[in-house]
Image (cartoon, grey):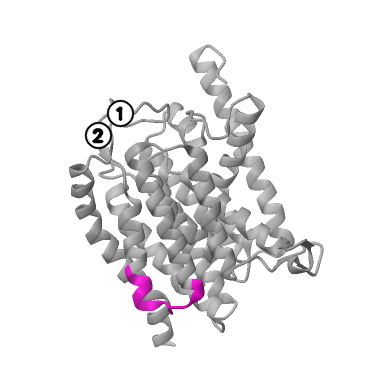
């Protein structure tokens, strides 16, 4: 049991944490040298809240830390190869965006490609638990050559990559959410027994991701010395995949990542309803509204961490039906909070904001 704990949890976690923590300051210097920085005087973006140039390439040490630990503790096979290949492609696209601000439509297309690589290797959502009872086998639903289980897996991976990308609005917010989410998924994998390759990969990679996120958090907590940048989608992709591999318990993953996922859904809906592209930029995310209401960045990051930890912990003890009700409650809470904060800010400013 001790060897199992060390090989699946402790050593992968520590290796990823130390690797990322050691590589991040090196990356900070290199990113400054090659001009991959977020300079508010040069880069015009409505969501910018910092006042001085800060490197935006945190996806590099995050991915590198997860890769180093993965090479040591994960088996080398088709699944892990596809996961890290797709993650590396996501990193490269992210670095290009961090440097040149490439088209969001091109980025989104590449997200789909990354998801397709993983699904093509055999990772899919084979079933979901029916809250009314029983199991719904998604492999039974086919549309020509396309299987519903593969469609759901691709949608989930792309969704998580984009929604978590929007959760890095304040310093420390994203790595804390990722660390808590990965730990919760890792614990879930252990609860269902580490018997097959998928479960072993999911468990080990969960704690690798968590370690890498905490190693990066050391430098990203307010005041941040480095930003995640779009390259961090590489680590979001890994998180999305382990949530599939952990017995396809997506409801738990939705709960632990619930605040950014719900905020992202409301953001897309709001932009479409107001005639804007879902990819347009604004300062109407939940963390932006919390900033406008007077909360500091550290408190906002802690708020996200606490909510993720609470819902993640509770989800481990809920039935499938209970998780559905919890997800509905979470969506109502996030939606209500967004409406309330918008009302307070309109009242404070004395004018209506869209």
Q: In this view, does 17 lie to the left or right of 143?
A: left
x, y percentage for residue 12?
A: 36, 73
Q: Name the residue under label 2.
A: 53
Would you say residue 70 sits in the magenta stretch? Answer: yes
Q: Is residue 58 left or right of residue 162?
A: left
Picture disc at residue 196: none
Image mark count: 2
Residue 133 relative to residue 314: left or right: right
Which residue does the image show at 23% across and 39% down from the upper left?
A: 35
Distance (Cα) linking label 1 and label 2: 7 Å
* Residue at 47 percent of width and 62 percent of height: 182
Badges 1 and 2: C-beta atoms under 8 Å apart?
yes
Q: In this view, does 17 lie above or below 334?
A: below
Q: Is residue 207 above or below residue 154?
A: below
Q: Check residue 249 for magenta coloring.
A: no
Question: Residue drawn 67% across and 53% down?
Answer: 326
Return the x and y of residue 157 as percentages of the image width and height. 56, 56
Indicate the quadrant where residue 335 lies: top right
Residue segment shown in magenta: 68-79
């Amino acid at each position: 049991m001790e060897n199992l704990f060390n090989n699946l949890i402790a050593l992968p976690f520590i290796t990823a944490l130390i690797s990322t923590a050691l590589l991040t300051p090196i990356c900070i210097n290199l990113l400054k040298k090659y001009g991959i920085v977020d300079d508010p005087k040069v880069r015009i973006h409505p969501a910018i809240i910092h006042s001085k140039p800060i490197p935006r390439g945190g996806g590099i040490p995050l991915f590198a830390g997860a890769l180093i630990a993965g090479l040591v503790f994960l088996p080398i096979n088709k699944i892990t190869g596809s996961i890290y290949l797709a993650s590396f492609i996501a990193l490269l696209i992210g670095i290009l965006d961090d440097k040149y601000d490439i088209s969001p439509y091109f980025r989104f297309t590449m997200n789909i490609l990354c998801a397709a690589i993983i699904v093509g290797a055999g990772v899919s959502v084979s079933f979901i638990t029916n809250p009314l009872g029983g199991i719904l086998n998604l492999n039974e639903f086919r549309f020509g050559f396309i299987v519903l289980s593969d469609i759901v897996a691709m949608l989930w991976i792309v969704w998580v990559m984009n929604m978590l990308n929007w959760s890095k609005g304040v310093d420390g917010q994203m790595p804390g959410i990722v660390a808590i989410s990965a730990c919760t998924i890792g614990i879930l994998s252990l609860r269902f027994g580490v018997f097959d390759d998928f479960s072993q990969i999911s468990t080990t990679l969960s704690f690798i991701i968590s370690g890498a996120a905490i190693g990066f958090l050391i430098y990203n907590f307010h005041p941040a010395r480095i930003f995640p940048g779009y390259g961090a989608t590489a680590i979001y992709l890994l998180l999305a995949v382990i949530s599939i591999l952990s017995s396809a318990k997506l409801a738990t993953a939705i709960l632990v990542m619930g605040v950014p996922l719900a905020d992202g859904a409301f953001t897309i809906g709001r932009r479409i309803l107001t005639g804007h592209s879902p990819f347009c930029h604004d300062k109407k995310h939940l963390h932006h509204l919390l900033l406008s209401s007077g909360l500091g960045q550290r408190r906002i990051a802690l708020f996200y961490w606490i909510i993720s930890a609470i819902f993640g912990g509770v989800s481990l003890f809920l039935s499938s039906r209970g998780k559905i009700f919890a997800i509905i409650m979470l969506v109502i809470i996030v939606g209500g909070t967004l409406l309330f904060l918008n009302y307070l800010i309109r009242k404070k400013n004395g004018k209506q904001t869209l």
